[in-house]
Amino acid sequence: MNITDVDDKTIHASQKEGTSLKEFTRKYEQAFFEDIKALNILPADKYPMATEYIKEMVAITKSLIKKGFAYKGEDGSIYYNIRKFKDYGKLANIDVAKLKAGASGRVKKDEYTKEDVQDFALWKAHNKEDGNVFWETSVGRGRPGWHIECSAMSIKNLGKTFDIHCGGIDLIFPHHQNEIAQSEGFTGKPFVKYWLHNEWLLVNGQKMSKSLGNFFTLRDVLSKGYSPVAVRYLLLSTHYRQQLNFTFDGINAAKASIDRLNELIRKLQDINSSSKKNSSIKKEIETAAKAFEKAMDDDLNISEALAAVFELVKSINSHIDSGTIGKKSAAATIDFLKKMDGVLGVMDFSKEEKLPSDIMKLIHERERLRKEKKFAEADRIRARLQEKGIRIDDTPEGVRWKKA
Ligand SMILES: [Zn+2]
């Protein structure tokens, strides 16, 4: 996972703020790492930063000039000649040959559109607007274009060809198309085997934007009291190639799903009776595990994978209600859920705190009395527990206690 810590946007914004580029990007980098940690996202093996790969970017740029893919413009910047790359436009479905002759010029901006297909800058010669952001290199004083940064970092860390490149669909053109042109022009090898592009995020059915007042960061959402795992569940429960519509109802529904999983885990942890043989549970678990894996292997079909988990949850709950599940099957079900949670990362397997045995005795004694409908005596025990700082709640799933 690379960090492009120098580009048009960050240079412009840091200057507006009057801070150095490093100081400016540092802030966002730290916030980003805090957010992915809050969302329980596994860290990447490496986080290369663009500003540490200038040497590699210059080397690729020089090689592309030598091979005839790039040229120096009058302003001293170095541009990629898109007509020299046979498959330019293929990833984004643009037919470059059909573009009117002369329509193609040069663009120094990092971001442009399909309507604006032009030669793009690999290296940007220094100008006033860049202030003190520049490097003295053998291709002159200046800074890299945004696209070359990703090619340099990925080739150095992953090799000439690698399997999977991810990104938002908004990056297909020009960014990923340009990465391909640069990398394949430089190495002569296929750059990436599979591109996984995720769809837009919508908020209340609209594109998230500050002007619409529907712009939320993760921090905004968490400060409203929502839990990070609920946000995680909401984000992962929509297929990556589908638009995800973020709503607060959606987070509430996500929380309810997680509660359902955690309630089952609690119940399973409480099962103590042994020797209840139920061979069907073992089969059900195997079926669910297979269905989960098959769905995830099919381009990460998360809806089907979750359906497999919840089908099992429903069935195990009914086994618990009818008393047809023993200790062993309960443990097997917990193992299954732990495995699935290696992917989902939303469940809570921590056991409830144990109470001293004399207090547990009182709780059990009270339960016995209630079963015998000796409610007055049961209430006296409840009062005694209350004095010891233990609050008792009778729920449909049985008795629950809390330290008051
Ligand atoms: Zn990139």
Image (tube, rainbow, N blue to C red):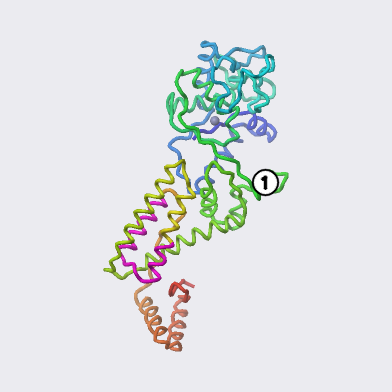
| Number of disc labels | 1
Instruction: Report helix, strand or loop for mark 1.
Output: strand
Of the four image quadrants, the one with ligand 1 is top right
Residue 66 is left or right of residue 202, and the answer is: left
Residue marked by disc 1: 206
Q: Which residue is at the far left?
A: 275
- Density class for disc 1 (Cα within 10 Å; few <14, some 14-19, many ≥20) is few
Q: Nearer the viewer, residue 324 or 342?
A: 324
Where residue 322 appears, as percent x and y from the top left, is 38, 71
Q: Nearer the viewer, residue 296 or 75?
A: 296
Where residue 274 appears, as percent x and y from the top left, is 28, 69
Determine if residue 260 is in view. yes
Q: Which residues are magenta?
A: 314-341
Where residue 301 appears, as percent x and y from the top left, is 47, 45
Against 25, residue 212 (above or below) is below
Q: Nearer the viewer, residue 241 or 174?
A: 241
State yes or no: residue 319 in magenta. Answer: yes
* Magenta span dominant secondary structure: helix
State yes or no: residue 220 in magenta. Answer: no
Residue type pointed to by label 1: Gln
Residue at image point 70% right, 44% down: 210
Q: Which residue is at the far right?
A: 211
Quarter assignment of residue 134: top right
Against 274, residue 117 (above or below) is above
Quarter assignment of residue 43: top left
Against 45, residue 314 (above or below) is below
Where residue 385 appears, as percent x and y from the top left, is 44, 79
